[in-house]
Image (cartoon, rainbow, N blue to C red):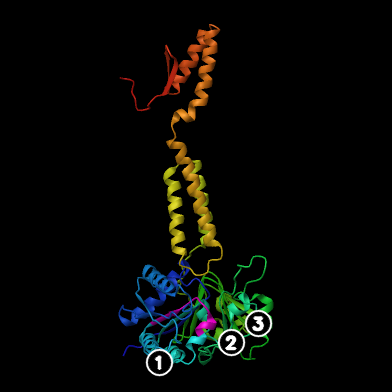
Amino acid sequence: MTTLPRLLVIMGSGETAPTMKAVHRAVFDRIAAVTGGKVDAVLIDTPFGFQENAPTLAAKTVEYFMDTAERHVEIAGLGRTDTGDVVAVETAIARIRAADWVFAGPGSPTFALEQWRGTVLPDTLADKLRPGGPGGAVVFSSAAALTLGRATIPVYEIYKAGHDPFWLDGLDLLTPLGLPVAVIPHYDNKDGGNHDTSKCFLGERRLRIMEAELPDDVFVLGVDEHTGVIIDLDAETAEVVGRGGVTLRSDGASVRIEAGTTVALEVLRSGGGDHAAPIVADATGGGGAAAELAVASSGVSDEVPSLRAVTARLEEAFDVALGARDADAAVAALLTLEAAIVEWSRDTLQGDDLDRARAALRAMIVRLGAVATDGVRDMRDVLGPVVEAALAARVTARADKAFGVSDAIRDNLTAAGIEVRDTPEGVEWLVLDPSDDGSR
């Protein structure tokens, strides 16, 4: 029997965004290197199983992995476990047990925990991660990541419903791995603008209150948005990937490990605080006695800018193109932004970036439409006021017998592509066809 590597991947957010494409591909490739190419992959659909659009969310997630990693992911069919359909639940868990790669992401951590308790799912996941087990990759992000530790933030109840801060018991899959933690994704969230929504929408004040209620041996493992940590339990390493960093926090003291850094797993197990700072400093290149804890990064992260940055860049390119009257470049900027919006629309939590991008796209279309309208308007409508004014001046010149001035006006109009004809009914004018060579 092939033994798979034991990989635990915790993502702060962006699990279906362009920022995490390289990470997903790298994890799949590490499993495929052992299996010979094929990877049995399963999406655990519980965290969003309460939503009316759960089937749509599951389908979009499957589509994302096919597009970004060219991997088919099967839906577990574990949206709910409280339906009384024992066969469906056991069938779903059997799929998860047999999978080489399992993924769970956004939704409600409270709902997920309620549905998973009383089932063998926690033991099934723990079995993949234990020494001597079947191995495989367990990839949890956002809401699902919240459930991994000993304590879980009921984020909807606190942030949306206004409950006083409190903890829920988590799955506690990480204490057996030497990580007695409370996992907090969205650690660097800034959606609040004028109020603090960091630490998964708790903010610093509420986290301090909750932190005091944790057992003495439990610390916080914070993972920034569009960031992940790949924990290789066989190699005993932890690689921080993506855009931000990972924070180890104990009793309010924090140590941060930036993306692009790989450290020995012992660094994470140290729990943060002042005692961990020298270890992390050495592991990130500071040298010294603990430098052997550093491991060369595998560099799986793509340099993917945010949708907001992409939007700003393409708006500027569009402005330049219009200024240069380069229609092709303007259309290219517009189409590139549209493609970026489609790609980023799979990301569950966008803040207002998606709305901003759509507004920019609409504005670009309107501006391009205005340019196009000017291009297709009848040139008589555009030039009429100017030509009529010139012809009126010509009539005045002729009445004053200033025939030289009259002829000059006519000649200048002809040079500008306007033919003037004197008829018994009065003066007529028309816009000459630039392609007419005058041979008619």
* The magenta stretch spans residue 109: yes
- On screen, residue 387 versus residue 193, left or right, reads left
Point out residue 172 in the picture as x, y percentages from the top left corner: 53, 89
Q: Quadrant of residue 110?
A: bottom right
For label 1, the SS is loop
Number of residue marks: 3
x, y (%) of residue 70?
35, 70
Residue 118's disc number? none
Q: Is residue 247 visible?
A: no
According to the picture, the residue beneath numbered tag 3 turns out to be: 165
Q: Which residue is mark 2?
A: 168
Label 2 to label 1: alpha-carbon separation: 28 Å
Q: Earlier in the sequence, mark 3 or mark 1?
A: 1
Q: Which circle's residue, 2 or 1, is located before the other in the chain?
A: 1
In the image, the segment drawn in magenta is 101-112
What is the spatial separation of the Cα atoms under label 3 and label 1, in whole angstroms?
A: 37 Å
Q: Secondary structure at mark 2?
A: strand
- Name the residue beneath numbered marker 1: 133
